[in-house]
Amino acid sequence: MPVLFSPVALFFLARARRSSSVTEYKMAYGLVLISAAASVTAYFTGPPAAEWLSGVLTLDQVWIEDHALWGRVAFTIMALAGAASLVALLAYWQDEQPHASLPWVVGGLTLLAFAAMVWTAHLGGLIRRPELRF
């Protein structure tokens, strides 16, 4: 889910930057926050999924460790983006304007997290389908 929500949040964030619409900023920050919350589920279901999959397939431990490392990186960056989004939403709820650099921080972190999540998903696919490795 976070892989799907992140680009949508980036789209709304870019659109809000162009229009300066508070509603679109709130929507973008909300989507980043939802994506960060979904990344918690994705991250903490990793070890049980690896355990279950090891009973079904023969797994290469190096690939699992790489996938876990990149999952941790993606989760950490997404958590930071979610925290920054929460700061912005709290400012709006208090009828204040968030700092002007906050959309850039949230956008940059979300973009980095999205890239890390895509790479993590790719590594996960290679674990599940070793014949695709080259």
Image (spheres, rainbow, N blue to C red):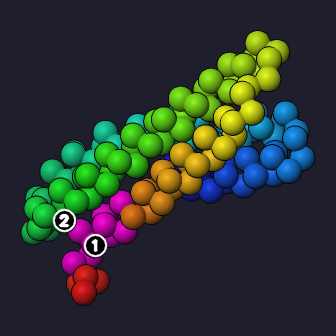
Tell me which amino acid carries mark 1.
Answer: Leu
- Residue 35 found in image quarter: top right
Secondary structure category for the residue under label 2: helix
For disc 1, the marked residue is: 126
Residue on which disc 2 sits: 63
Location of residue 23 with respect to 68 vertically, above or below: above
Label 1 crowd (10 A; few <14 / some 14-19 / many >=20): some
**Separation of marks 2 and 1 at Cα, in angstroms:** 8 Å
- The amino acid type found where label 2 is placed reads Trp
x, y percent for residue 46:
27, 47
Q: Nearer the viewer, residue 95 or 47?
A: 95
**Residue 117, located in which quarter of the rendered image?**
bottom left
Q: Main secondary structure of the magenta part?
A: helix
- Nearer to the camera, 103 or 118: 103
Is 127 inside the magenta-drawn segment?
Answer: yes
Residue at horizontal 48 percent and vertical 42 percent from the top = 78
Does residue 114 show up? yes
Picture residue at 13% right of the left edge, 64% below the top:
62
Q: Going 42% across and 57% down the picture, which residue do you hit?
A: 116
How busy is the neighbourhood of tag 2: few (under 14 within 10 Å), some, or many (20 plus)?
A: some
Magenta residue check for 34 = no
**Mark identifier at residue 108:** none
Q: Is residue 59 above or below residue 30?
A: below
Give the image quarter of residue 82.
top right
User: Would you place residue 11 above or below residue 25 in this image?
Assistant: below
Residue 15 shown left or right of residue 76 in the figure: right
78 or 125: nearer the viewer: 78
- Residue 129 image position (x, y, % from top left): 26, 76
Secondary structure state at the residue bearing disc 1: helix
Q: Magenta region: which residues?
A: 120-130
